[in-house]
Image (cartoon, rainbow, N blue to C red):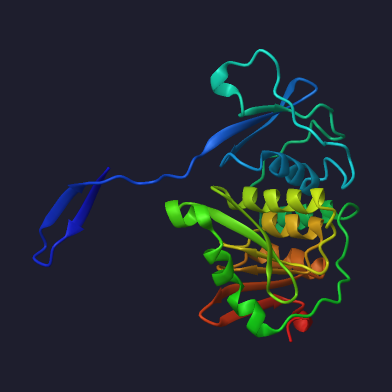
Amino acid sequence: MERVRLAESGSTARVGASDTLVVEAALELRAGNKPFAVLMRTPGHDHELVRGLLFAEGIIARDDPLDSLTVPEGLPAELRGHVVELGVSPPGAARSLLSSSSCGVCGKTAIADLDGRLSVCHSGLQVCAEQIAVLPERLRLAQTVFAATGGLHAAGAFDAGGELVAIREDVGRHNAVDKLVGWALLAGRVPCWQSILCVSGRLGFEIVQKAVAAGFAIVVAVSAPSSLAVDLAERYRITLCGFTRSQRFNVYSHSSRIV
């Protein structure tokens, strides 16, 4: 790598330098020894990632047995750690895990499709505005890998007092949330009605969908939500906070939880 510096005169100076890069690698999921999905992720907490993803997509239920991920026999050495067998064929295994941004009629249909498997949040959780405002900074301070690479998203679970309970990092913001949801499932904390989800990026439909599935009552983000994310939060009674920075934030849905 070369580091380029601009001098005051407009000239440039190039110096040799080293940099720490975040790892991005594919994880292939197999169900019944058949290809199921391929995820691009930062290695680590793979069990949580898989469980959180399948749960959020409605492919497995909260208590479905996925207690172990095994490595298929006969894999080349370079693929070990990057291919896992679920051991079972989950209901709905043929369902595509591909997701994309949605809008308009397609978006409304996407929300309607969630009815029947997602529950409206009836949590009575209330949090002081001052606690909400500092969550992104607390999340950032806990991002150890981001501090070294500058290239990771994070998702954190906080209690009502603003204390960080768990954090997960990944090159993909969706993966970070899946890892956190997987942690909550394995810890027996789902539904997370007394918890706050804080994410380091923007709030799209998929992030809010995962939050609703896990039962988070409040979702906080550093950046903006999409219109469909707000629609989803309104429908399932989730409090959505965006642009949380510099001691200010916007509340887009169910503001009664912020006191």
Q: Residue at x 46, y 57 (%)?
A: 147
Which quadrant, please, contains the C terminus? bottom right
Q: Residue at x 84, y 28 (%)?
A: 89
- Asked if one can make out residue 101 in the rendered structure from this viewpoint, the answer is no
Q: How many marks?
A: 0
The location of residue 169, given as percent across then percent down, is 58, 52
Does 50 appear above or below 142?
Answer: above
Relative placement, left or right, of 174 versus 112 is left
Q: Who is closer to the viewer here, 148 or 221?
A: 148
| Residue projecting furthest to the top | 74
The location of residue 176, given as percent across then percent down, is 63, 51
Relative placement, left or right, of 67 versus 220 is right
Q: Residue at x 56, y 73 (%)?
A: 243
Does 236 appear above or below 73?
Answer: below
Which quadrant, please, contains the N terminus? top left
Q: Residue at x 74, y 50 (%)?
A: 183
